[in-house]
Image: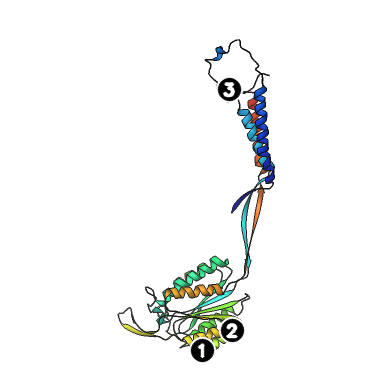
Amino acid sequence: MSEFRFAHPYVLILLPISLLFLYRWWQNRWRTQAGVLQYSDIRLLSNSTKSLRLRFRQLPNLIRLIAWITLVIALARPQSGETQNIISGQGIDMVIAIDISGSMAIPDFAPRNRLDASKVVLKEFINGRKASNGAFDRIGMVVFANDSFQLAPPTLNYDILEILIDDLKLAKDVGLQDGSAIGLGIASAANMLQSSTARSQVIIVLTDGENNVGELDAISAAQAASSIGAKIYTIGIGQRGVFALEQADGTIETINSNLDESSLREIASIGNGEYFYAADLPSLEAIYAQIDRLERSPVERSEFTRWQDMSDIWIIAAMILLIFERILRHTIFQTIP
């Protein structure tokens, strides 16, 4: 941000004082000045017209006045500066584990299904971390169905994360078997954070089901993650019950949304975090906003301004004006002594 100031603003008091003295000097000068040429009868000049030289006879005095004002401004040392923000701090490392099982296709987040609604809110969450925290937080991503897969290690490249979120698909659409390996998802996230040196490590688990596949149960995975200092937040989404989904070939598939809230609460308790339930899009947005407020890294912001002196410009301008004034006074506006 550009700024302007005077290093010595008190010098500007010379302007009104100088203008007052100049006004009094000019007033006395014109009052006491005697005529140089005398005419026997001034009616000889009654039909004469004023020349441009006569009309602008005060121009040299005006230029001198402007030059004096310019010199006073130069003496006050005008300066221009560019203000810069210095942001320093230490962020946190965060991994988001997302369920991509078949039940995430249930469209109870109308007009979106559960996965698409999660993608929209997750992108808002990432953009919010970037805008409010100066992009100091590293965020990684894990997806899980019958197995877990690491999409991105904790990174500051939020643009890449948004691209990965846009490309998220259901397990069946990427050739994976169905299921919700929540324990493997937590374990994959914890592996990403194992070598982290950040002040805080956070795992966010988003699912609409229960841990029904995988060789690692979710409670054991949460205990392992907690042992390395990771805090775990769990989010259960979707309305409870049985849903009928129409497949691409026209057949109807019945999906039972078995959200295991008790296990998710226990996982969050083991990980010193919290459990949240979202039945619709507004509640899901509110959950991410609450996690955003809970997990804040300390960031220091300070400002400094680099000032550049502009006095030389005003001095040069004043010198040019004074030279121009002397030229006019000794040529076009020269007077008879």
Mark number, residue 217: 1
Disc 3 secondary structure class = helix
286 shown above or below 256? above
Q: Label 1 sits on what residue type?
A: Asp
Which mark identifies residue 54? Answer: 3
How many numbered discs sit on the rendered protein? 3
Mark 3: amino acid: Leu
Disc 1 or 3, which lies upstream in sequence?
3
Local packing at callout 2 (Cα closer than 10 Å; few below 14, some 14-19, many 20+) is many
In the picture, residue 310 is in which quadrant?
top right
Q: Can residue 88 be seen?
A: yes
Circle 2: residue type: Ser
Tell whether label 1 touches label 2 (CB within 8 Å). no
**Quadrant of the rendered image containing residue 334:** top right
Circle 2 sits on which residue?
226
Q: Is residue 122 left or right of residue 138?
A: left
Where is residue 193 drawn, in percent x and y?
58, 78
Residue 172: which quarter of the image? bottom left
